[in-house]
Image (cartoon, rainbow, N blue to C red):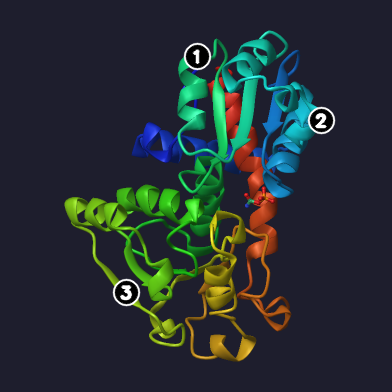
Amino acid sequence: MKNKSLVAINDLSRDEIVKILNLAEEFEKNPIQNTLCQKVVATLFFEPSTRTRLSFESAVNRLGGRVIGFSEASNTSVTKGESLKDTILTVANYSDMIVMRHPVEGSARYASEISPVPIINAGDGANQHPTQTLLDLFSIRKTQGTLNNLNIFLVGDLKYGRTVHSLLMAMSHFGATFTFVSPNELRMPDEYKIYLEEKGLKFSEQTDLNENLDKADIIYMTRVQKERFSDPVEYEKVKNVYVLREGMLQNTKENMRVLHPLPRVNEIHTDVDKNPKAYYFPQTMNGVFTRMAIMSLIFGLE
Ligand code: CP
């Protein structure tokens, strides 16, 4: 991984994924390290973020590095018409690594092709969010004790949700069985179903969230992504289609955990928060350890 960009989860082999998770586990045990000493990491967020940006910045600070960057492009020369290429080539002169979130699918790949410093994709449109996936895998392995042969329910906006697309691809290394729960308007795109078929993995689709929940090892809830809809009327139709409530967890497996990349809107009722099966806030903490591991490996830590 040394000096390489991380644009899509498929950039990583199964062994590289496991190596990241193992190192993240070490950082969880010993979070105070100096592996990023003298390094400057730029965080360029052309789209809003709380967890991804702040957990990257927390990870850099905890590892002795420095952070520069912006959390909204409206304060930068992008508003004067500067291209993404010119922004990247400029910021690469000020930093050793660029973490970028951008609304355009493929923008992170493009940035990685022109940048002299590694690019980490912090989300490109509805396409990929590989570091979220790695922290999701870390959370799944930590709570289930394994990544192998689990029943994963992906719920909500499976059409535009980049986190479910990346997670599905990563879990295919580990023999998962998927249940896709979505309204017809937000079904998992065919390209991902074909991907699973080619890998020989099983999946099923349903519209009712209550069905088969007793079989789940992980229920991965997602927000309906308002910002990806061109027609607000279409968003209104589906925005509150699923609300997970505490009572619905009654017959689920003892070790089942509810994950969510967050932010949530209404899709998990707050009455779930106090249930021991709710894992979405510890999941955010795992983002710091996982991002520590990713950056350290790209900077050459063995
Ligand atoms: N999970 C996630 O990407 O959250 P943010 O949008 O707050 O970064």
Residue at 49% from the left image edge and 51% from the top image edge: 162
Q: Position of residue 258 (x, y in %)?
A: 56, 71
Measure the alpha-carbon separation of dots 2 and 3.
43 Å
- Residue 183 vertical placement versus 288 (above, below): below
Instruction: Note whether residue 179 is visible.
Output: yes
Three-letter code for the amino acid on which mark 2 is drawn: Asn
For label 2, the residue is: 75
- Residue 279 vertical placement versus 48 (above, below): below
Residue at 47% from the left image edge and 81% from the top image edge: 253
Q: Relative to residue 291, is residue 53 drawn left or right?
A: right
Q: Relative to residue 208, is residue 228 drawn left or right?
A: right
Instruction: Say what secondary structure mark 2 lies in.
Output: helix
Numbered badge on residue 114: 1
Instruction: Say what secondary structure mark 1 lies in.
Output: helix
Residue sitting nearer the eye, 243 or 88: 88
**The quarter of the displayed image where residue 74 is located:** top right
Measure the alpha-carbon separation of dots 1 and 3.
40 Å
CB within 8 Å, label 2 to label 3? no
Residue sitting nearer the eye, 301 or 39: 39
Say whether disc 2 or disc 1 marks the residue closer to the N-terminus: 2
Residue at 34% from the left image edge and 66% from the top image edge: 178
Q: Nearer the viewer, mark 1 or mark 3?
A: 1
CB within 8 Å, label 1 to label 3? no
Residue sitting nearer the eye, 192 or 171: 192
Three-letter code for the amino acid on which mark 3 is drawn: Glu
Say whether disc 1 or disc 3 marks the residue closer to the N-terminus: 1
For label 3, the residue is: 205
Instruction: Say what secondary structure mark 3 lies in.
Output: strand
Q: Residues within 10 Å of mark 1 (few under 14, many from 20)?
A: few
- Residue 244 vertical placement versus 126 (above, below): below
